[in-house]
Image (cartoon, helix red, strand yellow):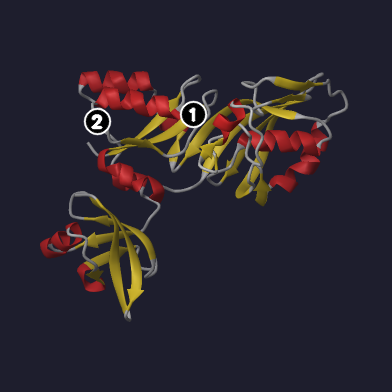
C-alpha cells in the first residue's frame, strides 16, 4: 500500500496524532505527513504511506490558507490557543488601512516564527523552550507570500479580517497576523485557520480520519497513486526491462534508456520515473562527463 492520502484534519488533532491514527487504521508503520498544521487549525494535511514516504520532499511546495485575523488582542502563541497578554479595543481601524499595508507582506519577506512553534534552536523545539519558561532569540527566515486577498471585514471593538493567502512552504500565518497588527499600530492574533491547499492537494477532495476508517473497514480504501502526487514533475519513462532492472539497482541511466515527457521539459532537474504500469520513484537528470544521465534519488522497489 504505497501512495498518498489527502487528509482533512479537524480541530484539536495534532499532525502527529493524525499520523498515529492512520498507522492504526491501516496497520502500517510507514506513515508521514507533508507539513505540520497547528492543533487548532483545520484543512489539508498531505499524508504519505508505505514507500511513498520517500516522495514527500518532492511534492509541490505551494500552500493556501483561509485565515481570520482579530485585532486589538495579543497572546503568547499568536493565536487564540495562548494566554492573553494584551487586549485593547481598536475603534479607528478600517479596511482601507489594511488594504494599504497588505502589499508590504507580498513577495519574499523576512519572518520571525512564533515562539510556540516547532522550529529548533540548539536542538530543542521552540515550543518546549517556551513551556519551560526559557527566553531565546527566535531565528528569522525568508518566506514567500504570493498573494493575500481580503474576503470579509467585520468591524467592532475587536475587528476581524478574513483573508485568503497563497504562500510557499515554511510560512507561519500566525506570524502574518501578529506582524499585520504591529504594522497597523495595534496587536493581531490568528482567530481561525483553514489550509485549503497543500502540496498539490485540495480541500474539496480531502477525507477525514472517520471517512478513512470507514473506507478501510469496507475494503474500499485505495491511496492516491504516487504519480498523481508528482503530477507537477516531468516524466521519465523507462523503455526496457533492462532499464527497469538497472533503475531498481540504483544505477545511472543514459538518455537513450528513457523517454522524457514533455520532450521540451529540459535535460536537468527532478523527474518522476515511470515503468509501463506504475511509478518507480524520483530521478534527477544530470550532466556528467558530457552525458545526460538519469540519477536515482528515490527508488520505489
Q: Quadrant of the N terminus?
A: top left
- The answer to which image quadrant residue 283 occupies is bottom left
The mark closer to the camera, 2 or 1, is: 2
- In the depicted view, which residue is nearer to us: 223 or 139? 139
Circle 1: is it few (<14), some (14-19), or many (20+) Cα within 10 Å? many
Up-down relation of residue 80 to residue 300 (above or below): above
Residue located beneath label 1 in the image: 43
Point 82% across, 31% down: residue? 186
Q: Is residue 115 above or below residue 84?
A: below
Q: Is tag 2's residue or tag 1's residue first in the polypeptide sequence?
A: 2
In the rendered structure, the answer to whether residue 6 lies left or right of residue 71 reads left
> How far across and how far down the image is residue 291, in percent?
30, 78
Which disc is residue 201 wearing?
none
Q: Quick one: which residue is furthest to the bottom in this view?
A: 290
Q: Secondary structure at mark 1?
A: strand
Q: Is residue 169 left or right of residue 159?
A: left
Residue for point 55% across, 39% down? 64
Residue 28's tag is 2
Q: Nearer the viewer, residue 45 or 264?
A: 45
Q: Is residue 89 left or right of residue 215?
A: right
Q: Is residue 45 above or below residue 55?
A: above
Q: Residues within 10 Å of mark 2 (few under 14, many from 20)?
A: few
Displayed quadrant of residue 24: top left
Extreme-right residue of the structure: 92
Dot 2 lies on which element?
A: loop
Q: Is residue 78 above or below residue 290?
A: above
Q: Position of residue 262 (x, y in %)?
A: 35, 63
Rendered location of residue 10, percent (x, y): 47, 21
Relative horizontal placement of residue 247, taking residue 135 as reference (left or right): left
Q: How much space separates mark 2 and mark 1, taking CA atoms?
A: 23 Å
Residue 175 spot, x, y in % from top left: 66, 37
Amino acid at each position: 500500500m504505497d501512495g498518498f492520502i489527502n487528509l482533512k484534519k479537524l480541530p484539536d488533532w495534532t499532525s502527529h496524532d493524525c499520523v498515529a491514527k492512520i498507522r492504526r487504521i491501516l496497520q502500517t508503520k510507514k506513515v508521514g505527513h507533508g507539513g505540520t498544521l497547528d492543533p487548532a487549525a483545520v484543512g489539508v494535511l498531505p499524508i504519505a504511506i508505505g514507500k511513498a514516504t520517500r516522495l514527500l520532499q518532492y511534492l509541490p511546495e505551494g500552500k493556501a490558507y483561509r485565515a481570520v485575523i482579530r485585532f486589538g488582542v495579543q497572546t503568547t502563541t499568536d493565536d487564540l490557543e495562548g494566554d492573553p497578554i494584551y487586549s485593547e479595543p481598536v475603534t479607528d481601524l478600517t479596511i482601507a488601512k489594511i488594504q494599504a499595508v497588505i502589499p508590504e507582506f507580498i513577495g519574499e519577506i523576512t519572518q520571525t516564527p512564533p515562539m510556540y512553534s516547532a522550529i529548533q534552536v540548539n536542538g530543542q523545539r521552540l515550543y518546549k523552550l517556551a513551556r519551560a519558561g526559557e527566553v531565546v532569540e527566535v531565528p528569522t527566515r525568508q518566506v514567500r507570500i504570493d498573494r493575500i486577498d481580503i474576503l470579509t471585514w467585520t468591524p467592532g471593538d475587536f475587528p476581524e479580517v478574513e483573508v485568503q493567502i497563497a504562500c510557499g512552504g515554511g510560512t507561519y500565518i500566525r506570524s502574518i497576523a501578529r506582524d499585520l497588527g504591529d504594522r497597523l499600530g495595534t496587536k493581531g492574533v490568528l482567530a481561525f485557520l483553514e489550509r485549503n491547499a497543500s502540496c498539490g492537494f485540495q480541500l474539496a477532495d480531502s477525507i477525514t480520519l472517520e471517512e478513512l476508517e470507514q473506507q478501510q473497514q469496507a475494503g474500499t480504501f485505495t491511496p492516491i497513486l504516487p504519480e498523481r502526487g508528482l503530477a507537477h514533475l516531468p516524466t521519465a519513462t523507462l523503455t526496457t526491462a533492462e532499464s527497469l532492472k538497472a533503475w531498481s539497482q540504483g544505477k545511472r541511466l543514459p538518455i537513450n534508456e528513457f523517454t522524457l515527457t514533455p520532450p521540451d521539459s529540459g535535460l536537468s532537474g527532478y523527474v518522476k520515473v515511470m515503468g509501463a504500469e506504475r511509478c518507480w520513484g524520483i530521478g534527477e537528470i544530470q550532466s556528467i562527463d558530457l552525458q545526460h544521465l538519469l540519477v536515482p534519488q528515490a527508488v520505489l522497489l
